[in-house]
Amino acid sequence: MRHQVVIIGAGPAGLMLGRLLERAGVDAVILEQRSADYVLGRIRAGVLEQGTVDLLRRAGVGARMDAEGHAHAGCRLEFDGDALRVDFQALIGQQVMVYGQTEVTRDLMAAREGLTVYGAEDVAIHDFDGKPWVTYRKDGQTHRIDCDYIAGCDGFHGVCRASVPQDAIKTFERVYPFGWLGVLVDQPPAAPELVYAHHARGFALCSQRSSTRSRYYVQVGADEKVADWSDDRFWDELRARLSPEVAQAVRTGASIEKSIAPLRSFVAEPLRFGRLFLAGDAAHIVPPTGAKGLNLAMSDVAVLADALIEAVVEASDAGIDAYSSTVLARIWKAERFSWWMTNLLHVFPETGDFGRRIQRAEFDYLAGSRLAQASLAENYTGAF
């Protein structure tokens, strides 16, 4: 079997890359270790930058997003109950779209015309410095695909980055001493826009997936277990960290999903190794505070798609030669903003009272400076 491009991973990055390539007439197969139902069952973020919105439309999969998504012109920040609304639209003329990553994945799956192999086990990549090929096992049989290029969109724990020789890649990482305990509930959101709250008890976030489904988070220790958090305990803790106005608006219910996500910052360099390219979570991880994970992945594959189309259709390596440096420039800006948001809004016990006073001063500066708010708006909406 032969395809021009093999994409490893059928998350939104891999599916979007496949969609862009097939619309340009480039033959690409997608290999995914998990089942399609498992991929659709993953609960992830849902704040889309304008660039991501535009890319979905370019790929011909934006109709349901436009019909069902919710445009947000700002967000609300709280510090010990004091509130600040950052008005993206008034500050920089930008907004974001709230539309769940699960729905993005569903739309890309439905539009897929090329071959996607789900349940592809023991995927291995070979000779990506020369004439690449990929093997996998399906239904007890081993298959081989020869190709021109391999796109590693298989996540942080995937095979693609792990296959790169250690002396050819450098990684940068910070693991945070806490995680986010998240609850999904079929209740209307507590506020019309996202609410980010800093409290002495820890961070909290009021997010949403639709007008009838909400996603809430609280900061918990890295060693916490989901089993130790009943729904009642979660709702009590969430309300304790919010301003009275927002806390009273929280409508509780039985959780339909509950999980703890660890927080880390991670970047790999470079992102091209011969004919292998890394994109999405295989290349970088950001703390979710800045709503950058999905958006960075979409930005990566938009650049990679153009580069691969240029290489296959026009026989030019200019795009693939520039891929790594191009996307890393944006990745590090997003990493910086996500790090800044995380440091502003979370409790770091090791910094003590001095650290909280610095956080308070940062919040007060933000509240009093239109330029500082414009900087936040520019970074949050992806307008940098």
Image (tube, rainbow, N blue to C red):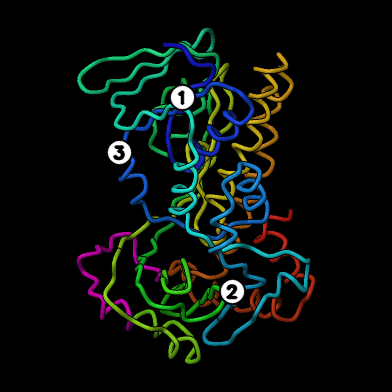
Q: Which residue is mark 2?
A: 359
Q: Are marks 3 and 1 in contact (CB under 8 Å)?
A: no
Write down the quadrant of residue 110 in the picture.
top left
Q: Nearer the viewer, residue 212 or 317?
A: 212
Q: Considering only vertical position in the picture, is 31 above or below 241?
A: above
Element type at mark 1: strand
Q: Nearer the viewer, residue 211 or 122?
A: 211
- Between marks 3 and 1, how big is the CA–CA gap? 16 Å
Q: Which residues are magenta?
A: 217-236
The crowd level at tag 1 (other Cα within 10 Å; few <14, some 14-19, many 20+) is many
Among numbered discs 3 and 1, the one appearing first in the sequence:
1
The crowd level at tag 2 (other Cα within 10 Å; few <14, some 14-19, many 20+) is some
For badge 1, the amino acid type reads Val
Write down the quadrant of residue 36 in the picture.
top left
Among numbered discs 2 and 1, the one appearing first in the sequence:
1
Element type at mark 3: loop
User: Which residue is pictured at 48% across the width and 58% down the height?
Assistant: 100
User: Which residue is pictured at 39% across the width and 63% down the height?
Assistant: 180
Q: Give residue 374's position: percent from left, percent from top.
A: 76, 68
Which marked residue is nearer to the observer: mark 2 or mark 1?
1
Q: Which residue is mark 3?
A: 35
Q: Which residue is mark 1?
A: 29
Confirm whether the magenta stretch covers residue 338.
no
Q: Give residue 200's position: percent from left, percent from top.
A: 45, 80
User: Which residue is pictured at 53% across the width and 27% down the height?
Assistant: 169
- Between marks 2 and 3, how big is the CA–CA gap? 44 Å
Q: Considering only vertical position in the picture, is 42 above or below 192?
A: above
* Left or right of 38 in this view: 5: right
- Between marks 2 and 1, how big is the CA–CA gap? 48 Å
Q: Are marks 2 and 3 in contact (CB under 8 Å)?
A: no
